[in-house]
Amino acid sequence: MNIEFTKGHGTGNDFVMINDFDGVMDLSEEAIAQICDRHFGIGADGLIFVTRTENSEVAHLLNDEPAAEWFMDYRNADGSKAEMCGNGIRVFARYLITRGLSEIVDGSTLPIATRAGIKDVTATATGFAVDLGRWKVDGGEFLVRTSGLSVARPGLGLNLGNPHVVVALADMAELEGLQLHLAPTLEPAPRSGANVEFVVLDDPLITQGVASISMRVHERGVGETLSCGTGIAAAALAIRHWADNGQNFWRVKVPGGEVGVRMFPTQDGEHVAISGPAELTFTGTFSL
């Protein structure tokens, strides 16, 4: 079976995109894991099927947003389904626009269907911004153990359409010493797992109205990645929650680059948005 694909990334978080407009491609988790394997496949942190929303499992979302023509069917590198991907949706938008499948007119938004609902994407000077919607503290506090830390640390659970646990560290030496090729363990264990973000604050935290932090992440179903869009938002939200400083503009530094975070009020509650680059790197055919 030959599969045509396009590869792309957002701050080093990389994805394989495959057209499945009719929603009929039935690849097993094992096949997806083979495609994402960095030694025997194409190599990626995740796979995205490009599917028309009307032919997808979230077709009901068209009742609320008829303009959401495209569904981002996101799969983790192990083949499991995921609700959302903040970097992936920016790369997905780049793909749709580059291939002439959609457009973002000046001042307009591109609604994209995901398992976490409709997400609105806008164009920026350096890439795209995506409104991740409402967020919430979810699951309370966790005890987090990971290789490279001598003692367990408390972590805060948040939900941004997908689950996260954020841990604050003392300094960059602790952050750099983590061995995140091994999955952290969480107590209590979340039912569906969670992405785990480890964060260090800049000193000073806020410069010219923007707070700055550094982060590394272990993604469920993947391992350590160079970036995680929803995790970046979760990290900023957790630090703001702990600091109780009302800071709404953040810059988050990850191994793959920098991503901006903004919190803002809406009629249905506070939303959080991220902004950053999205690039397509190459196309090809893979024999599965």
Image (tube, helix red, strand yellow):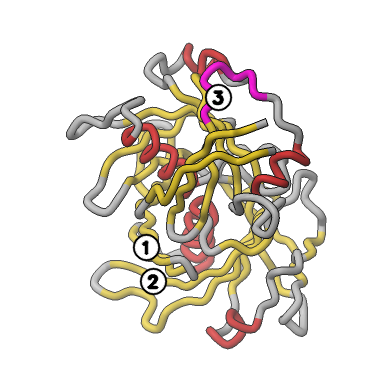
Q: Which residue lies most toward the bottom here?
A: 173
In the figure, is residue 181 to the left or right of 116? Answer: right
State which region is magenta: 19-25
Q: Are marks 2 and 1 in contact (CB under 8 Å)?
A: yes
What main secondary structure does the magenta stretch of the protein show?
A: loop
Q: Which residue lies most toward the left here?
A: 106
Q: Residue 137: where, in percent of width, then height?
A: 60, 50
Q: Mark 3 highlights which residue?
A: 20
Q: Residue 31: where, in percent of width, then height?
A: 73, 39
| Location of the C terminus (image quadrant) | top right
Q: Residue 173: where, in percent of width, then height?
A: 58, 88
In the figure, is residue 72 to the left or right of 280? Answer: right
Q: Mark 2 highlights which residue?
A: 212
- Residue 21 on the magenta segment: yes
Amino acid marked by disc 2: Ser
Observer-nearest of 102 and 160 = 102
Amino acid marked by disc 1: Trp
Observer-nearest of 77 and 286 = 286
Q: Secondary structure beneath disc 2?
A: strand
> What is the CA distance from the residue labelled 2 to the residue labelled 3?
39 Å
Observer-nearest of 157 and 191 = 191
Q: Secondary structure beneath disc 1?
A: strand
Q: Who comes first in sequence, dot 2 or dot 1?
A: 2
Residue displayed at 53% across by 64% down: 226
Say if residue 267 shows up in the picture.
Answer: yes
In the figure, is residue 14 to the left or right of 263? Answer: right
Q: Residue 205: where, in percent of width, then height?
A: 39, 76
Residue displayed at 35% across by 54% down: 277
- Residue 187 on the magenta segment: no
Q: Mark 1 highlights which residue?
A: 250
